[in-house]
Image: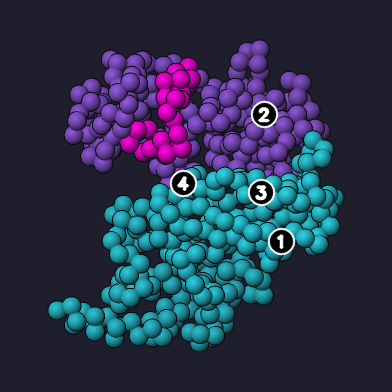
Chain colours: A cyan, B purple
Amino acid sequence: MIRKFNYTGRRKLKRQRVDISVINERPYKSFTATLDLKGLGLSDDAKVYIEPYHKSSFMRFPFGTVAIPQTPESTILTDIPSTSIIRFRVKVVDETTKLGRIIRVADKIKPKNLEESGNRKSILHIDWDKDLDQEIFRVTFPDNDYPRLEINRRIENAKELVKSNDIFRSLVFPVAVRQVAERIAIGGFNEEDDSWQSTWLKFIKGVLHVNIEVEFDDDNNEDEINDWVEEVVSAFCRKNKFRIKFEQAINKSK
Amino acid sequence: MITQIRRFNEVGIEKFRTLLHQIDDNETDDIPQSFLTDVYSCEIIRADVSLEQKVFDSKEEMIKYLFNQISTFLNTTLLYDKGMWTWLAAYYFDSICPKKGGKRIIREESKYILNPEEWNKYYRHLLASPVRLYRDLGDWSKIYLYGKPDVPGDLFEQLASRQEIAACRGVIEAATILYWNENDRRIKKGVRNKDGAGVLRRFVKATVPQFQMTYDLNSMGGQDVIQLLPKEYDKWKTA
């Protein structure tokens, strides 16, 4: 068992106390934040910072103190790529000594997107803002986050294509699901944990009804794993009736 | 040659990309001067700002020259101006891709053509990121500006690849105190070793991330960060 030491008493800031929304504007996004820091026994003069990030890109905004919250003049995300996948870190910092000690932190906060509604949890995040040159789409696997389907922003009406064009959907989504299944098959996670792989497995078993038991971490299992991947893609296509929709869409366009 | 600062348009960027391939394939070995002012490939950004096409031997000298020329209008949008930084790379090509033994060695594209999408590509540009770090960190950026203009170096790679560290004043000040020899104005010997007590790689990959769990390094000075360091760093403090 790995023991973790926390000498400085840093504690988590519950996500329910943080409300961040991203506003989609061109050329840059911006954000608004509301924090509830009452009743936590925090020192009035502890400083509050919000740090948006995306992969290796990072920004930092001072939000005043616990007692006197102050939204900065600008929260424009100039240094963060115009991706739809931005995460936020909120830090409450004791700066009464020279050492800026973090006393509360909330990390990997997903912002609300003011243009979206509904609370359905997405297990395949779509990034609409990637310039993929001549590629149409790409599936990526960021560290510790859900798989992403990147759609080339140069494509006109990309959102429309992804949401309602059955030709596009029937060709693209099975490829994405295959790549996700292949990545899950690499193993290295525990089905009981809260990783993206576990969530996907719940979807694969519960919604696609693929209940083949496979030991992913066993190197001698290659054939079984390949069969499992094929079955996942097959079940996904069956569930969405992709061939029928594809044929109908093709006939309609003739 | 002295001319006004420009930016490539899409056509110019594509032509430059093709030239890079041609140079790599030994089909040509120079960027034609006429291309740098070709009205179909680029446009003037500021008629009142001219740049001298010198060949620089030192990254520090080149970055400071460039910054001094453009600082008055270098706003956030321009930091990400793909056309401008790519044109600058073409204009100073002899500095950032000099002929060695009669041949130029073309490295990855993002060193010459700015990729503003992601920091992990952006920082690789041989002009945009050093100018930006010089703007953000002033004299503390000297550790980034060491060496020749065409060589980013392992140290730059280690420190600049994550924006959270690249522009964190406390971390960069501490790295400078530890690894920079002010008397000789060079990086101390052994800093870039892959293994060893307190080497840069350990500082960036192990120690700083560990501190970031507990301390807000952005609100600390370099000396404060130094105070936190374990004994393995002692020899660098005095080296």
Say above or below: A146 vs A59. below
Horizontal side of residue A153 vs B210, given as left or right: left
Indicate which disc, 4 or 2, sits on the residue closer to the N terminus.
Answer: 4
Chain of the residue displaying label 4: B
Q: Are marks 2 and 3 in contact (CB under 8 Å)?
A: no
The quadrant the N terminus of chain A occupies is bottom right
* Residue drawn at the location 24% of the way across and 80% of the way down: A249
Structural distance between the alpha carbons of marks 4 and 1:
32 Å
For the question of whether residue A166 can be seen, the reply is yes
User: What label sits on residue A36 in the rendered view?
Assistant: 1
Label 4 and label 3 in one chain: no
Q: Quadrant of residue B12?
A: top left
Pointer 2 and pointer 3 on the same chain: no
Q: Which residues are magenta?
A: B61-85
Question: Mark 4 touching mark 3, by CB under 8 A?
Answer: no
Residue B118 - label? 4
Instruction: Give the residue pinned by disc 2.
Output: B173
Looking at the image, which is closer to me, B59 or B215? B215
Foreground mark, 4 or 3?
A: 3
Rendered image: mark on residue B188: none
* Discs 4, 2: same chain: yes
Marks 2 and 3, how far apart at CA:
28 Å
Q: Residue furthest top?
A: B183
Type of residue at label 1? Asp
Left or right: A228, with A99 as reference point:
left
Q: Residue at x 42, y 28 (%)?
A: B73
The x and y percentages for residue A31 are: 54, 55
Q: Amino acid at mark 4?
A: Glu
Does B62 lie within the magenta span?
yes
Does residue A39 belong to the magenta stretch? no
Task: Determine which residue is flagged by label 3.
Answer: A70
Q: Label 1's element?
A: loop
